[in-house]
Image (cartoon, grey):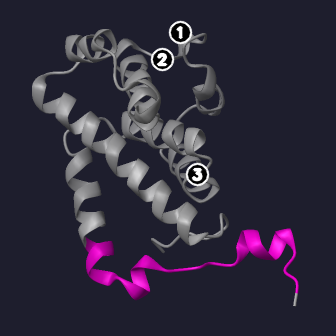
Amino acid sequence: MTTTAQETATTRRLSMLEQNPNVYKALVALQRASSEGLEPELIELIKIRASQLNGCAYCLRMHVADALAMGMDPMVIGLIPVWHEAVNHFDERQRSALELTEYVTRIGEAGVPDDAFERARAVFDEVELGQVVASIVMINAWNRVAITSKYPYEADERK
């Protein structure tokens, strides 16, 4: 029996919540802890940008919807992929977090350059910087779970 591309794209291979509930709960706890003390809009920018870079439709749809629900400007959301050109739409903390998100998400390509890290250090205190890095790591973990498991992009496991 042959499977069509559409069926393959929407057939979930695994549900971490159902098959690995302890791991899922631990990931949720780490996610919550990683974003404590940071602006919710900043966290959504990180989640959206990493999900774009990783090609995770499930997470991207979910976090764009979250950003819109919290009142983020749709124009800003649309400009996330070109944040470095749309400087008037992103403040210094947001630009720094987006830059760090790109480097950490693509860490295997060139690591995280010292100058990018220093730019982040200049706008975040040490605790916040750790939270930003942890938030980037967590959305990358979720992207990998969703992509590997083929979570259908229309779903939202949180509901």
Q: State if disc 1 and disc 3 touch (CB < 8 Å).
A: no
Left or right of residue 103, residue 53 in this image: right
Percent position of residue 113, x then y: 33, 16
Identity of the residue drawn at 74% across and 68% down: 9
Q: Residues within 10 Å of mark 3 (few under 14, many from 20)?
A: some
Quarter that holds the N terminus:
bottom right
Start and end of the magenta stretch?
Answer: 2-25
Task: Residue type at mark 1: give it.
Answer: Val
In this figure, which residue is indicated by the disc labeled 3? Answer: 65
- Judged by its main secondary structure, the magenta piece is helix
- Marks 3 and 1 sit apart, C-alpha to C-alpha, by 23 Å
In this figure, which residue is indicated by the disc labeled 1? Answer: 87
Element carrying mark 3: helix
Which residue sits furthest left? 126
Percent position of residue 39, x then y: 31, 35
- Marks 1 and 2 sit apart, C-alpha to C-alpha, by 5 Å
The correct choice, above or below, for 1 with respect to 123 in the image is: below
| Pointer 3 or 1: first along the chain | 3
Task: Residue type at mark 3: give it.
Answer: Ala
In this figure, which residue is indicated by the disc labeled 2? Answer: 90
Residue 38 seen anywhere in this rendered image of the structure: no
- Magenta span includes 24: yes
The correct choice, above or below, for 64 with respect to 19 in the image is: above
- Marks 3 and 2 sit apart, C-alpha to C-alpha, by 19 Å
